[in-house]
Image: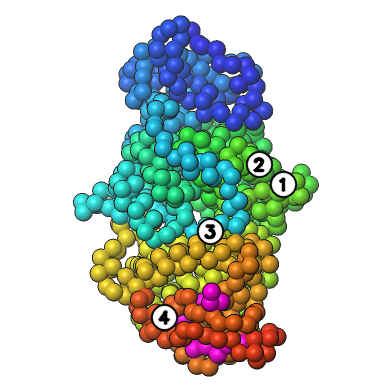
């Protein structure tokens, strides 16, 4: 069959790894040739002996619609007349050894419902977006001084129908968006909704990097969900996985018979922990595939940011490997220099082409300058997950309160590095699976103490400097460990105690968004001061948050003993008022607190000229601010 010519410039940019609209070139695209409507197919398979496109239109017979090779570029293409959107297809690839492979399109923009694996011809450009104002505001926003409060969601198990059927993207728009708006979160983060064959992978083993999973509907259905989020002033972050990919034979693994997307040597190309394959970041076309995928989601679906999964595994050649199981870089070190270059380019391109979007690193080590610009040796991410804060805080709260005084450093150590990066504080899905128990069940003590401790933890989250993230179910004290196989335990909300927790998170989001002191300087040391971090015998900490002339004080009591006549130093004179109390009866607490007003005493305390005596609730936190 006569092959339509792809632009030589397109192919040149692709070979250099810098075609930022490659998703409009490779894959399947409805078009016309000499006035005849049909579909142009194009695929990168440089080591193939022959490639053809197969589908129902030719009874899946290899060779019927052969593709022509663009010499020197490794790209094969053909035009098949009279095909249209909805056509199922795959690529039949003959390897250089004569073996026949049947592969799905790496650039496919829609796929069949699993376990079927064919790609589906789809067409962009017809969705009626109504989020122009949101996109305009986003592009001019300085996110560093804005509240970022993220609700992390697994789309298949947030809520289900009574029959167990998933909600569709459109049903999520109708139910999830109002819920998130009511709760006051600024963003939704979706666990990977890129197409994936295995439900139990939660989307982290993707086979369709340019396609939303068909489990919940069509690409336009997802656009509807994002559009509805934006119309209600909610951003959308996508969990995105460029660190590894699964070994499924129908997908990227040994795509043209060679280690095309991965490394040939398993010491470089295979993740031992996950049984997956590692991308070859040194190959230009592979880098283009991945960066093109990131840009595709920001472009075609108006996504507001990416959470890049497993960054640590990308940075270290010896990640989770023993001596002899990895290969050093050209300088003899364990840093993956090609992955570092890839991440820097990813961040530069995403942030320059889509200003105002966020690229967040799930990076769990002490790698320096993750959120610093590449120009000064950084990786260029906007945010980094603060895994150290999360582990220290949860470890502390699992201690019996009697022994917490001996672990006080777990509350204070994090501030020694809190401003070395732009940190996000994650209470994520990873902490409520695989036998770790739910968030509330991590808290020590009886049922009352667990609920009070969870209220205390959540208040601490919102008072501590950094962006916020909470996995679904944590906001109302889900008791059972999370499972992707069932919806959250929504009937718990018939219990006033669980409704109180939900109300607490709702009010904390509102407070965080209203109080400039809590969000205006989250990423600079000027916005934080300890009032006292040394009261380990009573397990009490007190801190000061400031921004743009606004001030707030938070005092947290990590024991079940009320503290009466507890004096703290204050930064200024005048009358103060309690604006938040995690022990309020509205949240299921014992209502121990402080009456209004609270005039400061001219009594020096804690190296400050004014001070105040307070009553601290048991396992509770209070927040104060100067009275107007």
**In the depicted structure, whether residue 319 falls above or below residue 506:** above
For the record, the magenta segment spans 611-628
Real-space Cα separation, disc 1 to disc 4, in angstroms: 45 Å
Asked if labels 1 and 2 touch by Cβ distance under 8 angstroms, the answer is yes
Q: Which residue is mark 3?
A: 147
Q: Which residue is mark 2?
A: 348
Write down the quadrant of residue 576 in the picture.
Answer: bottom right
Q: Looking at the image, which residue is at 32% across and 71% down?
A: 498
Q: Position of residue 42 (x, y in %)?
A: 50, 21
Q: How is the image coloured?
A: rainbow
In front of the other: 478 or 268: 478
* Mark 2 vs 4, N-terminal side: 2
Instruction: Tell me if residue 231 can be seen.
Output: yes
Real-space Cα separation, disc 1 to disc 3, in angstroms: 25 Å
Real-space Cα separation, disc 2 to disc 1, in angstroms: 8 Å
Q: Position of residue 186 (x, y in %)?
A: 47, 55
Label annotation for residue 583: 4
Asked if labels 4 and 3 touch by Cβ distance under 8 angstroms, the answer is no
């Amino acid at each position: 069959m006569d092959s339509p010519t792809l632009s030589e410039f397109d192919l040149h940019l692709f070979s250099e790894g810098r075609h930022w609209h490659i998703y409009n070139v490779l894959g399947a695209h409805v078009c016309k040739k000499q006035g005849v409507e049909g579909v142009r197919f194009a695929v990168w398979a440089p080591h193939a002996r022959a490639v053809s496109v197969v589908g129902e239109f030719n009874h899946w017979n290899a060779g019927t619609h052969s593709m022509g090779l663009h010499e020197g570029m490794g790209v094969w293409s053909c035009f098949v007349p009279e095909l249209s959107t909805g056509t199922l297809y795959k690529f039949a690839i003959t390897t250089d050894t004569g073996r026949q492979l049947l592969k799905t399109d790496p650039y496919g923009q829609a796929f069949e419902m699993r376990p079927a694996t064919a790609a589906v011809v789809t067409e962009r450009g017809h969705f009626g977006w109504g989020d122009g104002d949101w996109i305009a505001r986003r592009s001019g926003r300085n996110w560093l001084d804005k509240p970022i409060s993220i609700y992390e969601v697994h789309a298949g198990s947030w809520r289900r129908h009574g029959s167990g059927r998933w909600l569709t993207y459109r049903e999520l728009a109708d139910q999830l968006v109002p819920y998130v708006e009511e709760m006051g979160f600024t963003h939704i983060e979706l666990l990977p909704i890129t197409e994936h064959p295995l439900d139990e992978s939660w989307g982290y083993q993707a086979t369709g990097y340019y396609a939303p999973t068909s489990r919940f509907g069509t690409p336009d259905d997802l656009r509807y969900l994002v559009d509805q989020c934006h119309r209600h002033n909610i951003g959308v972050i996508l969990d995105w996985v460029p660190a590894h990919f699964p070994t499924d034979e129908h997908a990227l693994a040994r795509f043209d018979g060679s280690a095309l997307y991965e490394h040939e040597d398993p010491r470089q190309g295979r993740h031992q922990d996950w049984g997956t394959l590692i991308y070859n970041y040194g190959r230009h076309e592979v880098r283009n595939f991945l960066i093109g995928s990131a840009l595709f989601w920001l472009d075609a679906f108006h996504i507001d940011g990416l959470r890049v999964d497993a960054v640590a595994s990308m940075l270290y050649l010896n990640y989770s490997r023993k001596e002899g199981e990895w290969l050093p870089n050209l300088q003899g070190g364990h840093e993956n220099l090609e992955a570092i270059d890839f991440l820097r380019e990813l961040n530069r391109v995403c942030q320059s082409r889509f200003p105002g979007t966020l690229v967040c690193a799930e990076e769990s080590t002490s790698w320096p300058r993750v959120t610093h610009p590449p120009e000064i040796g950084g990786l260029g991410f906007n945010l980094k997950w603060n895994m150290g804060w999360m582990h220290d805080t949860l470890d502390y709260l699992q201690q019996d309160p009697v022994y917490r005084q001996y672990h006080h450093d777990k509350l204070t150590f994090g501030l020694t590095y809190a401003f070395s990066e732009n940190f996000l504080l994650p209470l994520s899905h990873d902490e409520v699976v695989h036998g770790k128990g739910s968030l509330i069940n991590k808290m020590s003590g009886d049922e009352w103490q667990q609920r009070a401790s969870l209220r205390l933890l959540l208040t601490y989250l919102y008072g501590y400097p950094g962006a916020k993230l909470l996995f679904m179910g944590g906001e109302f004290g889900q008791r059972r460990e999370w499972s992707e196989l069932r919806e959250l335990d929504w009937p718990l909300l018939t219990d006033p105690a669980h409704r109180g927790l939900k109300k607490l998170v709702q009010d904390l989001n509102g407070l965080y968004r209203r109080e400039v002191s809590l969000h205006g300087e989250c990423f600079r040391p000027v916005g934080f001061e300890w009032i006292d971090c040394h009261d380990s015998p009573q397990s009490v900490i007190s801190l000061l948050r400031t921004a743009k002339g606004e001030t707030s004080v938070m005092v947290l009591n990590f024991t079940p003993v009320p503290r009466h006549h507890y004096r703290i130093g204050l930064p200024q004179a005048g009358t103060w008022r309690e604006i938040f109390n995690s022990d309020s009866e509205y949240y299921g607490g014992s209502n121990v607190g402080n009456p209004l007003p609270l005039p400061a005493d001219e009594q020096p305390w804690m190296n400050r000229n004014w001070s105040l005596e307070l009553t601290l609730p048991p396992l509770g936190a209070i927040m104060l601010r100067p009275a107007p």
